[in-house]
Image (spheres, rainbow, N blue to C red):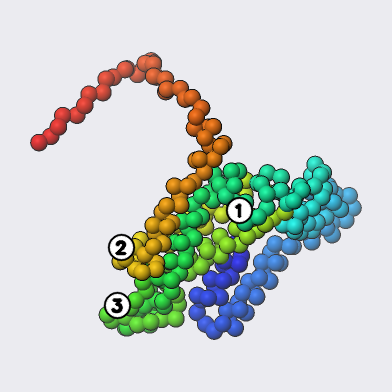
Amino acid sequence: MGPGFALVYLLAARGRVWRRAGHLAVAGAALAVSSAWWMVVVDLWPGERPYVGGSTDGTVWDLVIGYNGLGRVFGQGGGPGGGDGGGPGGFGGFGGQAGAGRLFNDVMAGQISWLIPFAVPALVTGLILTRRRRSAPTGDPGHIPGVIGSGRPGPGTRRIGTRSGAWTALVLWGGWLVVHYAVFSFSAGIFHPYYATAVAPAIAALTGVGGVPMWRAYRERRAVTGWALPAGAASPGRRPTRSPRCRRRSAAPTRPPARRPASAGWEARSVRPARARA
């Protein structure tokens, strides 16, 4: 999440680039202090204290940076329960073989990954069509909220320095998706299917925010971006309802819903069709 927020502020905030970079440096320092103070307190606590679970030396730093940090990305041995967390060849334990296609295997695709082939064209098309600067009334020294669209200034408006709200949203959620996809796909350590919940907000947001300009490009029959909607709309049809696991579930016999018997205080009433009105 952090890289996406930083990228949005660096590209879309007002002021010179060096000033924005300085603001990000101060924010990063504040984040580090607010996140690490309790780890310092625990490790400096004198005398006997409970052993930090998940660590190999009883320190919080080993838990955060080792087992739950770099160990998840590069793989490690040990940890709770012992054994190699990554397994042979970067298997990841539960999420399948590490690689570019991990999020689309039979285990992971049923979470939210089946919508990625639609979210990516929506992201690219939205960034192209909303890349122009935001417009504001000529008599207004401030700015107006961004509007999803082409970003072209209307009559009585002027360009201002900030990007449109749609463009900044796409940068934020696009950075979120790219970072999580890279980490989840190539992590050699322990990886669980429910980790996909971390990338679900980005996929949903890109589908909604980027889908609007993608639909407009399709209606306007643009030469390049107009093909993004048909290409993206065809991909959710390949969601993993055709995987062996889902086919077994769909083939299982189902029982019809039982009729609820009339109980005390309730009467079985027949439902009559409403008369057609003229």
Q: CA distance from mark 1 to mark 2?
A: 32 Å
- Which circle's residue, 1 or 2, is located before the other in the chain? 1
CB atoms of marks 2 and 3 within 8 Å: no
- Which circle's residue, 3 or 1, is located before the other in the chain? 1
- Which label sits in the foreground, 3 or 1? 1
Q: Which residue is at the front of the view, 134 or 76?
A: 76
Q: Quadrant of the N terminus?
A: bottom right
Which residue is at 41% across, 54% downward?
233
Q: Which residue is mark 1?
A: 101
Instruction: Tell me which amino acid carries mark 2.
Output: Arg
Q: CA distance from mark 3 to mark 1?
A: 44 Å
Q: Residue furthest left?
A: 278
Q: Quadrant of the C terminus?
A: top left
Evaluate whether residue 78 shows in this view.
yes
- Which label sits in the foreground, 1 or 2? 1
As drawn, is 120 to the left or to the right of 33? Answer: left
Instruction: Tell me which amino acid carries mark 3.
Output: Gly
Residue 223: give x, y in percent of width and height.
36, 69
> Vertically, is 62 above or below 81?
below
**Total of numbered circles in the picture?**
3
Q: Secondary structure at mark 1?
A: loop
Q: Residue furthest right?
A: 47
Q: Which residue is mark 2?
A: 219
Which residue is at 52% across, 64% downward?
174
As drawn, is 30 to the left or to the right of 115? Answer: right
